[in-house]
Amino acid sequence: MEALGLKVLRLAPGEAVVAGEVGEAHLNLHGTAHGGFLYALADSAFALASNSRGPAVALSCRMDYFRPLGAGARVEARAAEVNLSRRTATYRVEVVSEGKLVALFTGTVFRLGGDGDDVPAGTGNPAQGEA
């Protein structure tokens, strides 16, 4: 997050807001915000929101892009919990700029228990900050 210039604006149980600004280094060959930059912004909010309930690792994620952003655009990713169960949780992350929806990210996590649960194969390491 630091390398991309992202800042946490809000963090509460099951929710997070992360903000950034599209810089010249974040542009694609069309001169608009690279999808990877917007994905990293959304994924950061997703990781913070999901791990606010305890350690969690991503099971699946999806992102749909709706409108382009140019250099200098301020953008926020607003993560909200839409489902919470004992073992999984799902989050909706709206990526917005100037009040307009830029992209929509949805992600589901496997919630790790404190009783020595095994991490599902290929889900990453929560100790290293992976969602």
Image (spheres, rainbow, N blue to C red):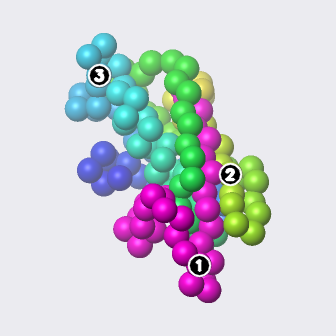
Secondary structure beneath label 1? loop
Mark 2 lies on residue: 90
> Mark 2 vs mark 3: which is more N-terminal?
3
Q: Is residue 107 left or right of residue 32?
A: right
> Mark 2 vs mark 1: which is more N-terminal?
2
Residue type, label 3: Asn
Residue at left offset 51%, top offset 18%:
67
Task: Give percent across and percent down for residue 107.
Answer: 60, 46
Q: Which residues are magenta?
A: 102-131
Residue type, label 1: Asp
Secondary structure beneath label 2? strand
Q: How many marks?
A: 3
Task: Give percent across and percent down for residue 27.
Answer: 29, 25
The circle drawn on residue 82 is none
Q: Residues within 10 Å of mark 3 (few under 14, many from 20)?
A: some
The residue most toward the left is 25
The residue most toward the front is 121
Distance between the alpha carbons at the discs numbered 2 and 1: 20 Å
Mark 3 lies on residue: 28
Mark 1 lies on residue: 117
